[in-house]
Amino acid sequence: DAGITQSPRHKVTETGTPVTLRCHQTENHRYMYWYRQDPGHGLRLIHYSYGVKDTDKGEVSDGYSVSRSKTEDFLLTLESATSSQTSVYFCAIGTSGDSTDTQYFGPGTRLTVL
Amino acid sequence: AQSVTQLDSHVSVSEGTPVLLRCNYSSSYSPSLFWYVQHPNKGLQLLLKYTSAATLVKGINGFEAEFKKSETSFHLTKPSAHMSDAAEYFCVVSDYGGSYIPTFGRGTSLIVHP
């Protein structure tokens, strides 16, 4: 257990509503990542952060925004949820951010958009 | 550019028989390669990683993988499967492509029969 929590763990919402997922770490690591996991696609990167207020887009960033105002928290927001955003969302942390970096994953949030 | 291909979406073995999960990669630089395991309804956990040291890498729970540059492969093996090995396995490649963002394979589901 790498000291990563995600909240909520499960959420059901309706199309068009805003949703915020929270990732919290106790390790004080610089790098944090948001992924989504869908059957047949593995994990795809949504956004990542390399420090407080420093974020960048990943492979599937459309429809998502992030914020990191403190080292320990990385928030993922769906401004207006759509059914295509039904997925399992994983947060991860990294220590060095280089190619050898091991990522440590949270337990995931299962989001259903009706 | 980097990419990774897991050659089997599902692998089925009997308990006590060898396990082989296949992974091929493409990388423009000297890559790092990882295998992660995901048990049902859990986050991902590192099994092992290659970072340009010994080409035969030993991981947790009796798994190992061999980096073969000439074949661009990083196959995961275990001599004898256990029921607890049933899970989803992800091969991951990371190199410097402007940033060290890892690329995940689509996953291989390992099924272990008693």
Image: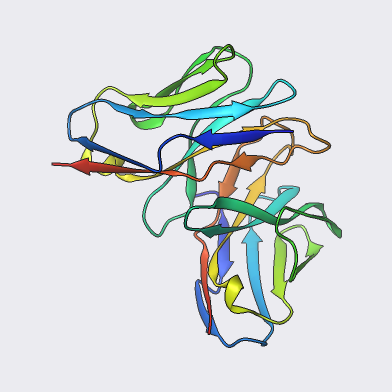
Q: Residue at x 64, y 62 (%)?
A: A24
The number of discs equals: 0
- Residue B47: x and y in percent read 46, 34
Q: Residue at x 74, y 53 (%)?
A: A58
Q: Residue at x 48, y 53 (%)?
A: A40
Camera-side residue of A78 and A29: A78
Q: Is residue B105 above or below residue B69?
A: below
Determine whether, in the image, residue B76 is placed left or right of residue A11: left
Determine whether, in the image, residue B9 is placed left or right of residue A26: left
Q: Is residue A25 above or below residue B87?
A: below
Most extreme residue toward the left is B114
- Residue A21: x and y in percent read 64, 72
- Residue A29: x and y in percent read 71, 47
- Residue B19: x and y in percent read 30, 29
Quadrant of image for the C terminus of chain B: top left
Quadrant of image for the N terminus of chain B: top right
Q: Residue at x 65, y 49 (%)?
A: A93
Q: Quadrant of residue A89?
A: bottom right
Most extreme residue toward the right is A53
Camera-side residue of B21 and A26: B21
Q: Is residue A50 above or below residue A6?
A: above
Q: How is the image coloured?
A: rainbow
